[in-house]
Amino acid sequence: MAAHFISEELLRHLWSTHYLNTAGLSTTDGRSLTVIECGVLNRDSGPDFHKAVVEIGGVRYKGDIEFHRSMHDWLAHRHGKNSRYNKVILHVVLNEPEKRVPTTTESGRTVPVLILSGALSTPLEKIGDNLAREEYSSRSAAIPCYRRNEHCPASVLNPWLATLASERLRAKTDRMFRRLCEIVGEQELLVAEPRPLYAEFQEHDDAADIPLPEHTVMSSELRRVLAWEQLLYEGIMDGLGYSKNREPFGILARELTILRIKKIAAFTELQPFDIQAMLFAFSGLLPDIDTIDDQQSKVTAHQLHTSWASVRQSLASAGAEPLLALPPLHQAEWTFSPTRPSNFPTVRLAAAGVLIAKILSEQLLRRIIAIVEEKYLSPGTKRDQLRGIFDLGPDLFWSFHYVFAEAAARPHALLGTARIDEIIVNTVIPLAFLYGRVFNRKDVCEHILNIAREVPALENNAILWKMEKQLLRGKIHVAAAFQQQGEIQLYKEYCLRARCSECAIGKEIAKAAPL
């Protein structure tokens, strides 16, 4: 199986399911390696596994593990510039590269590397087949109470889903708060790796190899609008990236930051089109004009190149070229297929340029909070106003194209209502809820919860289809995204973990007979 056809999901799978010949493992620098605990799989952004325990050269470490197809991917994905990866204790890659490159954290610590090839107990093709079968079984497997929940009434289902939706919102808010603290540290250039206390592990000489605790943020530092704007920006970019392009959009947001863009704007006036030009240039998706046949695409690409050159010239004249010293992503980082044309990264980058301009010139964050905290508007009206913020209107080029190569069959919105609602649910609502918690604004928390209940149901996915078929069975009508959030929380945190005794539905069933 060729390396470029191997997903990182497969690498994580073979790690967590113990497909390694554990005897005689060693890192690339020759130190013996023993895997004591594989760690906890992380489905969110950041390292692939948390809380792993390994012994390297006779010294025990606890921290994160990151997986890639090659050692070069650590550089390509910019992990060495992201403090979120400062706790990585082991970098696991598939094949020995022709030329080794060091794995270095943002703080300058060198991370040990394990190369998997030659250490597998099962051929890679068979591991891939096993993963495919397990994924199919997982998708088709029934939830624990499938055969017993037929008589669970709507009077139990409705309030329980509401409780779980709030639980999921709090979890999202907690993740946002951790990221906000990281952003504050990054903007102050205070990200460091002070030595923590690991009482359960032995002391050793190489203190630099011990993962460091996160920066502690003072409450006064959380009042800085710039940090909140960056948090909003990253959330928007995550929503634009959706599932297929979440990582490259995240890289752009963390490198071409709001702070960097504001500094660039101090030397040259930035219109939305100029920001689009920067995004296309740094994404690696700005095409060579000579490769385009479609005339309108050729004109737009030429205008983007001209705008990008103008921005570079303005900064060069002011001696501010370092602001643009970012290596571009490679085209291979982006996924166009299989995905809907409306989700193509080219269209999403164009939308991002307009939204970033709104953050800069329209004080988008303040507008969002002002809408949420308004006392005399109904939640439905507030929802519509939030939608209006993200309604970008038609675009002379991108409303008629999905890529530069050819025109689309019919006109389309630069950002459709479905994607806007996704951004509201996954970014705006938890961000506003976090704002209320940080600044002790109970009214804001209450208002945003009321707005959340007014967002209509989003597109169904595999989890929602399963829960409708195996649990809800038409007993309640799911009309709101808030209910769907409860379904997802129920499935991921209770059904998959067989936490039936903690579930209101499981308790209801247990009244008749124990599970």
Image (cartoon, rainbow, N blue to C red):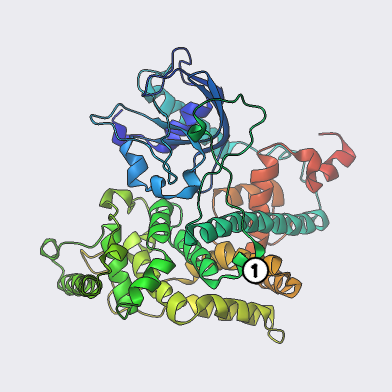
**Quarter of the figure with residue 385:** bottom right
Q: Residue 128 at x, y = what percent? A: 41, 28
Residue 284 sits in quarter: bottom left
| Residue 127 picture location, percent across and down | 43, 25
Q: What crowding class fits label 1: few (fewer than 14 Cα within 10 Å), some (14-19), or many (20 or more)?
A: many
* Foreground residue among 113 and 46: 113
Placement of 502 over or under 242, stated as above or below: above
Q: Position of residue 432 (x, y in %)?
A: 63, 69
Q: How many marks?
A: 1
User: Disc 1 on helix, strand or loop?
Assistant: helix
Give the residue at x 58% y 64%. 425
Task: Confirm whether residue 237 shows in the render.
Answer: yes
Residue sticking out furthest to the left: 290
Left/right placement of residue 422 relative to residue 71 reads: right
Residue type at the position of mark 1: Tyr
For this orientation, the residue located farthest to the bottom is 376
Compared with residue 13, is residue 413 higher up or lower down, i.e. above or below?
Answer: below
Of residue 356 and residue 336, the one placed in the foreground of this image is 356
Comparing 465 with 395, the one in front is: 395
Q: Percent position (x, y) of residue 429?
A: 61, 67
The answer to whether residue 267 is left or right of residue 51 is left
Closer to us: 496 or 219: 219
Residue drawn 59% across the image and 26% down it:
203
**Relative to 503, does residue 200 appear above or below in the rendering?**
above
Left or right, 304 with respect to 181, comes to left
Q: Which residue is mark 1?
A: 435
One can see residue 478 in this view: no
Toward the front, the furthest residue is 205
Image quarter in which the C terminus is found: top right
Quadrant where the N terminus is found in the figure: top left
Q: Is residue 24 left or right of residue 55?
A: left
